[in-house]
């Protein structure tokens, strides 16, 4: 199925999906998502498929995973602000521990059975892997970078961008810098010490990868940390940007979807998540400009995912992963330290 036919399936429904309070509200699901690439691809691919499958619409609620946790915590015991949560590994563990999300009933999700075993979770499926590396402007950065150390080069003074620890992107970068400096999740001081020496080169510390990407578009930074698929989406839009994996190993994590405990529309929540797992949806999302890494065994890796990230799920297992249980224990303190020490 080509993109034109896929997206034409319910063009009118897509428009309705973004209009909370419309006449369709009785059959409307509210789903949290991330900004940038994720909001775009779920609006253009997932929402039409879900509407065609269920007859219901979806209202997106874009926000960081940490913001989702805060909103669900504030509403605990009452009506949750959304039915479906979309989380990275650390916040997902936090949500489970806090009783904010329900156990996932695979019997209500036929496409769950097609996931690679690594992507099946008791509280919800992994819908992709996020992989990070260095994005750079090839017009101003003539020698392609190959490691995090390149961000410290004197020629990039005032031209480097990173994100804060509110974003998993920024946190994973710090964790990997710390790993390479000899630290562990139980000892982050080597990473902080190293990161402070990057201050002369920093032009910006963004709140999230979407804001970070805007700095590339505006020419305010030339090089920095970025998610693979978001960098490739910017490139597809004509932004002068290239993405490379670092030679010391690619930091990565799972992104998962969950039925919120107490969801007002639990059946629709299962329908929405199962739609995200559908092979035809994942195959479409893997295409440019989105380049979302599939988790279904029915979708072979192809395109930029295969050429730049992984040819098989076994390749993903060679990436760099962190102990998110330990990360959660220290994240609040690290965020305070980061906000205090990493100021431009």
Image: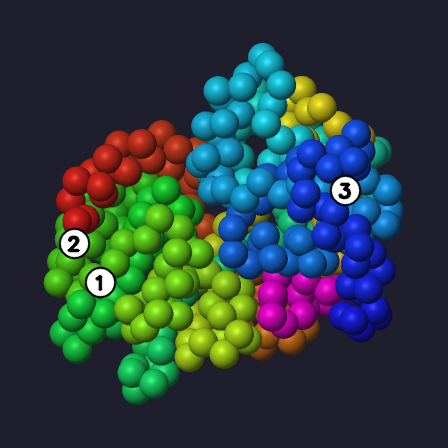
Query: In front: 264, or 326?
Result: 264
Q: Which residue is drawn at the image coordinates 71% and 42% (left, top)?
A: 58
Sooner in the amino-acid sequence: mark 2 or mark 3: 3
Q: Estimate the spatial distance between the alpha carbons at disc 1 and disc 3, rounded to whole Å.
A: 41 Å
What residue is pinned by disc 3?
57
Dot placed on the residue nearer the N-terminal end, 2 or 1: 1
Q: Residue at x 26, y 32 (%)?
A: 333
Q: Is residue 285 magenta?
A: yes
- Residue 273 can be seen in this image: no
Residues at badges 2 and 1 in contact (C-beta under 8 Å)? yes
The residue tagged with tag 2: helix, strand or loop? loop
Give percent across and percent down for residue 71: 50, 27
- Against 282, residue 338 (above or below) is above
Numbered disc 1: secondary structure? strand
Question: How far separated are the C-alphas under marks 2 and 1?
Answer: 7 Å
Circle number at residue 203: 1
Q: Quadrant of residue 294?
A: bottom right
In the rendered view, does 194 fall on the left or right side of 38? left
Pick the quarter of the image with the C terminus: bottom left
Give the dominant element type of the magenta stretch: helix, strand or loop. loop
Q: Under tag 3, what secondary structure? A: strand
| Range of magenta residues | 283-301
Numbered mark located on residue 344 in the image: 2
């Amino acid at each position: 199925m080509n993109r034109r036919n896929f997206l034409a399936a319910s063009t009118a429904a897509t428009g309705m999906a973004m209009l909370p309070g419309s006449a369709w509200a009785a059959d409307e699901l509210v789903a949290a998502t991330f900004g940038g690439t994720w909001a775009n691809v779920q609006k253009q691919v997932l929402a039409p498929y879900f509407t065609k499958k269920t007859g219901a619409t979806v209202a997106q609620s874009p926000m960081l995973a940490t913001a989702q946790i805060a909103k669900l915590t504030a509403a605990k015991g009452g009506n949750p602000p959304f039915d479906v949560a979309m989380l990275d590994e650390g916040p997902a563990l936090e949500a489970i521990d806090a009783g904010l999300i329900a156990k996932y009933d695979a019997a209500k999700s036929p496409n769950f059975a097609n996931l690679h075993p690594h992507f099946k979770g008791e509280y919800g499926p992994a819908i992709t892997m996020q992989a990070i590396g260095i994005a750079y402007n090839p017009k101003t950065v003539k020698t392609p970078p190959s490691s995090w150390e390149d961000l410290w080069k004197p020629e990039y003074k005032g031209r480097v961008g990173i994100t804060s620890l509110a974003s998993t992107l920024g946190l994973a970068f710090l964790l990997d810098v710390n790993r390479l400096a000899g630290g562990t999740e139980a000892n982050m001081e080597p990473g902080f010490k190293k990161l402070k020496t990057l201050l002369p080169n920093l032009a910006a510390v963004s709140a999230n990868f979407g804001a970070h990407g805007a700095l590339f578009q505006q020419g305010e930074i030339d090089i920095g940390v970025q998610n693979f698929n978001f960098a490739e989406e910017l490139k597809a839009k004509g932004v002068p940007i290239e993405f490379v994996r670092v030679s010391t190993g690619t930091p990565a994590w799972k992104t998962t979807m969950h039925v919120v405990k107490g969801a007002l529309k639990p059946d629709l929540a299962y329908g929405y998540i199962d739609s995200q797992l559908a092979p035809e949806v994942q195959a479409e999302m893997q295409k440019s400009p989105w380049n979302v890494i599939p988790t279904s065994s029915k979708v072979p890796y192809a395109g930029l995912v295969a050429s730049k990230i992984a040819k098989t799920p076994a390749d993903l297992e060679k990436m760099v992963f962190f102990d998110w249980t330990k990360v959660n224990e220290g994240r609040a303190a690290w965020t305070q330290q980061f906000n205090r020490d990493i100021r431009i």
